[in-house]
Amino acid sequence: MVQRWISFILLIGLIGVAFYTISNELSSNHSVEENVLSSEEVNNTPQLPEGLKVGEVAPDFTLQTLDGKTVALSELRGKKVFVNFWATWCPPCKEEMPEMQSFYEKYKDEVVILAINYTTTESGEEKVSSFIQEYGYTFSVLLDPEDEATKPYRAVALPTTYFIGTDGKIQLERHVGPLTEEMMIEKMNELS
């Protein structure tokens, strides 16, 4: 009889822990997704935290691609670089990605695209990999499981893109929200 009561109490405890874990995860995912803004919201949201300033040296990072290669921003000095922060669950990011792919196919010799996945908000790296494969994106996708790049770049709303010149400095204001191919061409031409 005592063993049944102990088993019953343990079962209730496990159910409580499971319920707490699930509700906590749902609420944390909800708070991250609240940081996704449409283009219209970005234009009407002055309370976004300030991004890095034009003229600042872009903070260096070293991250892995989906296929395990290491990419360091500092090794790209001398090239124009777009640093884009995104996630698979972000609707404006999904809107932007085909535009980015089209731009990449035409201008990959002129601009390096580093699409940094906000990996701490994903359900796993395999989700990111299957998303990229499903849509056939071929630009560089980097994983940021420790927020090594996301935090210093203050990428709190997605997508966020920084534009780095050949001098390794941020040369244009960051763009928060989806970019079109035309906007990317314009930004590329403004970089030196």
Image (cartoon, grey):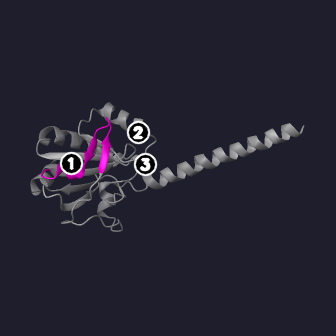
Label annotation for residue 19? none
Amino acid at dot 3: Thr
Asked whether 86 or 56 is in front, the reply is 56
* Of labels 2 and 1, the one closer to you: 2
Q: Which residue is mark 1?
A: 180
x 40%, y 56%: residue: 35
Q: Nearer the viewer, residue 180 or 13?
A: 13
The answer to whether residue 77 is magenta is: yes
User: On screen, 4 above or below 184?
Assistant: above
Looking at the image, is mark 2 or mark 3 earlier in the sequence? 3
Which region of the structure is painted magenta?
A: 62-79
For image coordinates 20% across by 49% down, the residue present is: 75
Q: Residue at x 43, y 48 (%)?
A: 121
Which element carries disc 3, helix, strand or loop? helix
**Dot in front, 1 or 3:** 3
Query: Which is nearer the N-term, disc 1 or disc 3?
Result: 3
Q: Where on the picture, by quarter, is residue 95?
A: top left
- Mark 1: secondary structure: loop
| Position of residue 122 measured from the top left corner of the image (x, y, whole percent) | 43, 44
Identify the residue at the far right of this view: 1
Residue 136, x across and y down, in percent: 27, 32
Residue that carries the numbered disc 3 in the rendered image: 120
Q: Amino acid at mark 1?
A: Thr
Q: Nearer the viewer, residue 156 or 176?
A: 156
Label 1, residues with CA under 10 Å away: few <14, some 14-19, many ≥20: some
Query: What's the CA distance linking mark 1 and mark 3?
Result: 26 Å
How far apart are the alpha carbons under marks 2 and 3?
A: 10 Å
User: Real-space Cα distance between discs 2 and 1?
Assistant: 26 Å
Three-letter amino acid code at the position of disc 2: Glu
Residue at the (33%, 37%) spot, across then down: 66
